[in-house]
Amino acid sequence: MTRPAISVLEHADLAEVLEIERVQFDDPWSLQVLRDELDDPSRRYTKASTDGALAGYLGLMLVQSEGEAHVNTLATAPALEGKGVATALLLEALRGVVDLGVRDVTLEVASRNLRAQRLYARFGFAPVGIRRGYYARSGDDAVVMWVRDVHTPSYATRLRAIDEA
């Protein structure tokens, strides 16, 4: 697979997003939640596309007063898992937040989602805590992960190495 094209996620993409949400998450977001997220100026949503189809998407919440960003969601179309879609989305997102003054990025990931945890660890995210029963439908815990100092030259070197791999 060639590298997916990364661009801004738009309202016209939400039908495809909902399809991925329903397959990938125990408690998928509704159309209204997704619309609200796209309309919120503190959010930044991007999509990955291959051959004109939605391959995945990523949502960030910016807390610029704190120099932080939070990964709200990251999902890949099931047929494209393991093909670099999530990596491409994270690369773009983490490079982009530096220009917005972000220093640190956080997220929660299901404790049973070891594949995602490995992806985040590759980007320097480290576990800092557990939110017990965070995912209501499944009862799964969330692992809270942070990556610090994404604005530094050493982190830019890390992203270049991931990009080249």
Image (cartoon, rainbow, N blue to C red):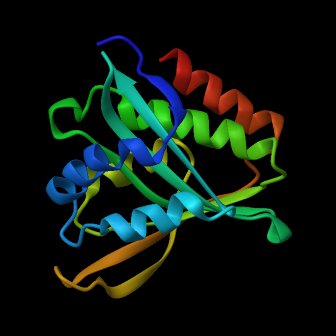
Q: Is residue 61 above or below residue 5?
A: below
Image point 38% across, 69% down: which residue?
Answer: 32
Please state which of residues 30 and 114 is positioned toward the viewer in this rendering.
30
Give coordinates of residue 57: x percent, y percent.
Answer: 41, 43
Q: Residue furthest top?
A: 2
119 horizontally vs 18: left or right: right
Q: Which x, y percent locates residue 92?
A: 59, 34
Quadrant in which residue 157 is drawn: top right
- Can residue 146 be seen? no
Seen at 37% across and 42% down, the residue is 13
Residue with the most extreme front position = 12
| Residue 4, x across and y down, in percent | 41, 21
107 or 161, nearer to the observer: 107
Does 124 sit above or below residue 6? below
Give the number of callouts: 0
Write the residue at 52% across / 40% down.
90
Residue 144 visible: yes
Up-down relation of residue 19 to residue 64 (above or below): above
In front: 141, or 92?
A: 92
Residue 119 placement: quadrant: top left
Taking the spot 72% from the left edge, 46% from the top edge, the residue there is 97
Observer-nearest of 19 and 67: 19
Q: Quadrant of the N terminus?
A: top left
Q: Is residue 55 above or below residue 33?
A: above
